[in-house]
Amino acid sequence: MTDLDQLRATLSHRDDPALPLAEAAYRYLLREIIDMSLRPGEVLNEADLQQRLGAGRTPIREALLRLAEDRLVTIHARRGTFVSDLNVTDLGAVYEVRTELERLAARLAAERRNDAEAVELASIRGQLPAFVRGSDADGLMTIDLYLHRLVFRLARNEFLAETLEHYLNLSTRLARAAVERTGASSSVWLADALLGFTPLFEAIEERRPEAAAAAAVEHAAAVEAHVRRSV
């Protein structure tokens, strides 16, 4: 499988059916919230979720509690559970933290990547422009998640990756809102943002930690600026 094929495969990714029910429910609801299939403020009825996901009360509650810890759902005693509202005032705070963490991840990735990973990055970097041209907004956002997680993996710090995943989810939801507001034109800024991975990957390949860190910050700033203008 080529790197480009692997990127395409992420567009139709499904969870392993052998996952524990609570984990499967969490991942399903996480995707639905991030891609805005479950709308901000929408009620999450436990009985409905049990029927839809084929899971019992305990796994659903465990999943909802995790999502509440992620700030993606809000649980009100005697009122119910709701998808958290989008708070645009959180945008600056989310990116403030995420940018610093991604700066660190990029620096570590440049220091710790192995030779095989450098080849992988070079291959993706070479194929990315053609792939970006052939993708819609949904595809571009999925690729963005894939490429960020690749950098997280190369940093080889599971605690950093776990924290970054949290902020990536929060900011991706805000970006989805921006895509909804900008419509077809969103593909343009998303494509430009994705091409920002080119200097980042090149710096990681060449073991230039400070250049990688700077490229990560520039990419995050560009995306934040587009989202801020849109929402």
Image: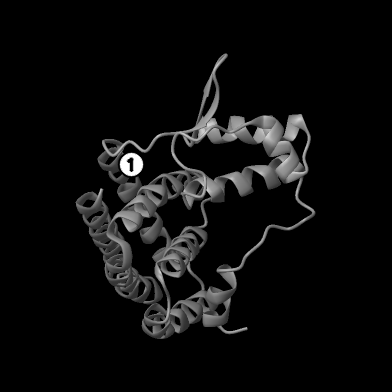
Apparent side of residue 84 relative to residue 53 in the rendered image (left or right): left
Q: Given the image, on which type of amino acid does mark 1 rest?
A: Val
Please determine whether, in this image, residue 6 is positioned above or below residue 143: below
Depth order, front residue of 28/201: 28
Q: Is residue 151 visible?
A: yes
**Picture coordinates of residue 105, whole percent (x, y):** 40, 56
Q: Is residue 212 visible?
A: no
Please determine whether, in this image, residue 67 is positioned above or below residue 81: below
Please determine whether, in this image, residue 97 is positioned above or below residue 111: above
Apparent side of residue 154 relative to residue 57 in the rendered image (left or right): left
In the image, what residue occupies the spot 68% across and 43% down? Answer: 25
Secondary element at tag 1:
helix
**Picture coordinates of residue 221, whole percent (x, y):** 24, 56
In the image, what residue occupies the spot 21% across and 55% down? Answer: 225
**Picture coordinates of residue 103, whole percent (x, y):** 32, 54
Residue on which the image places disc 1:
94
The tally of labels here is 1
Within the image, what quadrant is residue 111 found in? bottom left
Depth order, front residue of 41/193: 41
Depth order, front residue of 230/223: 230
In the image, what residue occupies the spot 50% across and 50% down? Answer: 161
Apparent side of residue 27 relative to residue 165 in the rendered image (left or right): right
Dot 1: within a 10 Å radius of its alpha carbon, few (fewer than 14), some, or many (20 or more) residues? some
Apparent side of residue 195 relative to residue 7 in the rendered image (left or right): left
